Amino acid sequence: MNYGILLNAYATQGGIPYDKISLVIAVGELVYGIAQPLLGILAMKKSNAFVLKIGLALLALGFLTSSVVRNGIVLIFTFGILLSGGTGAVCFGMIMGAVSPFIPKEKAAFASGIVNASNGVISSVMSPVMQSFLTGFGITKAMCLLSIPYFFVFPIAIFLGKIHRESKVQAEKQSPAQSNNLSSIIKNTFCNKNYIFLCMGFFTCGFHMSLIQNHFFSQIISYGIDEKVAVVAYTVFGIATWPAIYCAAFCVPKFH
């Protein structure tokens, strides 16, 4: 979700200083990152579908509460914690874990690329939609409208949870349950050089991507460029991520 588009709207329509709403989004980025491993542990104990349901509920609640808040400190809780925590709960890894029972192992890399690329697709589609909502309805109604899709997606998470329970019962009948010790998993993970390099790559990617996503739109309109042009530029940025991810989806399986 392109929360950076909301930054200028909160500053102009909500009366919150740019630096304060920028801090709120910065806190949200940290919460988004911290929430993922913590919720991943919860997914190990419960299920990915269980965490997805929590995430969808937090997203809907975060949008609805943030729609009426006009105080920077309170907005850190509603936008920076609730909304961003919910975004972390529906991250790429959690979604892949939830849909993996439906995917053959030989198609896992390809499916991973498709799911990852969908992030760019949604960003491209939602950018003009969000801007239209903000221009036509204002920040309050726009935030309420953006919460609606999560209520419709919630039944899908319930369905995935049901499938997970059934597959878990079947797996336990076929083989004895294995004990997953969290400390040993973390230790073995950080002994894997490939994982360390992967984390380094995501760190550099997340650093510049977060800056672009959060401030690119506001930076463009600060030069006097029309918001419609700015949102088109934002959309092009999202589209530009598609080819690389799709290439990875097709090429990675061939090297294994």
Image (cartoon, rainbow, N blue to C red):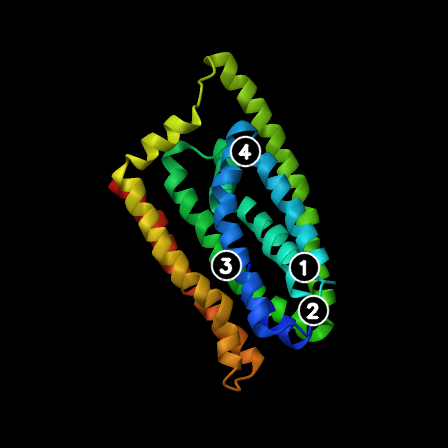
Label 2 sits on residue: 139
Q: Distance between the residues labelled 4 and 3?
A: 28 Å
Q: How far apart are marks 2 and 1 (CA)?
A: 16 Å
Where residue 229 sits in the image (x, y, percent)? 53, 79
Q: Where does label 3 land, which residue? A: 121
Q: Residue at x 39, y 44 (%)?
A: 110
Q: Nearer the viewer, residue 213 or 111?
A: 213
Q: Which of marks 3 and 1 is nearer the N terminus?
A: 1
Q: Which residue is drawn at 42% across and 32% down?
A: 104
Task: Look at discs 4 and 3 and give the one toward the viewer.
Answer: 4
Q: Is residue 226 visible?
A: yes
What whole-number distance in Å separates the C-alpha atoms at marks 3 and 2? 23 Å
Front in this rendered view, residue 70 or 229: 70
The reply to whether the C-beta atoms of the residues labelled 3 and 1 are less than 8 Å apart is no
Q: Earlier in the sequence, mark 4 or mark 1?
A: 4
Decide which of tag 4 and tag 3 comes sooner along the chain. Answer: 4
Q: Dot 4 corresponds to which residue?
A: 42
Quarter of the rendering containing residue 208? bottom left
Q: In which quarter of the image is residue 239?
A: bottom left
Q: Mark 1 points at which residue?
A: 74
